[in-house]
Image (cartoon, rainbow, N blue to C red):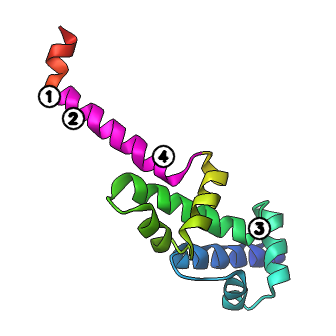
Amino acid sequence: EILIGLVGSEMCKETAFIRFNFHQDISINDVAAHAGISERYLRSLFLQYLNFSPLDYLNQIRINKSIELLRNTELSVKEVSFQCGFQSPQYFSRIFKQRTGISPREVTDSISVLYIISFYMSLFGHVLQS
């Protein structure tokens, strides 16, 4: 039980570090150093308890935040990529598409289309319903 508690607290520490620093240029080495453990042990903890690598976890946190920014702000894809800690908009777009099945631009375009439809419905809805 003590070992499980220790591992659980380490995972909490690592995942919290990633969640609070995802927007910066952090590496898996930074996460391991923050916790005072080796990268190899960090990888084994993530695989054991979360079933994916620390880098996959970091990228998923970044993608989740990028979706929020793409949906709720007027930021460009490039601006969102940098705000979410990606060092390259191209790498961001590739990871985004791998994770979501669509490109970041499709998210902003779909939001734009929905906005336009709702705008026109508010203006001409009564005509369309007749």
The residue range painted magenta reads 102-122
Give the residue number, with chain letter if any, for mark 2.
Answer: 119
Q: Secondary structure at mark 4?
A: helix
Q: Is residue 11 left or right of residue 96?
A: right
Q: Nearer the viewer, residue 42 or 109?
A: 109
Q: How far apart are the alpha carbons under marks 4 and 1?
A: 25 Å
Please report whichever mark, 4 or 1, sits nearer to the chain's N-terminal start: 4
Between the residue at mark 3 and the residue at mark 4, the CA separation in whole angstroms equals 27 Å
Quarter holding the N terminus is bottom right
Q: Which residue is mark 3?
A: 53
Q: Position of residue 57 (x, y in %)?
A: 67, 66
Residue at 27% across / 37% down in the picture? 116
Question: Residue 18, how many percent across, how many down?
Answer: 60, 75
Identified by mark 3, the residue type is Ser
Report the magenta stretch's main SS: helix
- Whether residue 31 is situated above or below residue 115 in the rendered picture: below
Q: Residue type at mark 4?
A: Glu
Place residue 63 in its image quadrant.
bottom right
Residue 123's disc number: 1
Q: Residues within 10 Å of mark 2 (few under 14, many from 20)?
A: few
Q: CA distance from mark 2 to mark 1?
A: 6 Å
Mark sitting earlier along the chain (3/4)? 3
Which residue is located at x 35 percent, y 38 percent?
Answer: 113
Q: Which residue is denoted by mark 4 in the rendering?
A: 106
Q: Earlier in the sequence, mark 4 or mark 2?
A: 4
* Secondary structure beneath label 1: helix
- Pointers 2 and 1 in contact (C-beta within 8 Å): yes
Residue 27 percent location from the top left of the image:
67, 82
For numbered disc 3, what is the local secondary structure?
loop
Residue 28 point in image, percent of width and height: 71, 81
Please tell me which residue lies in front, 58 or 15: 58
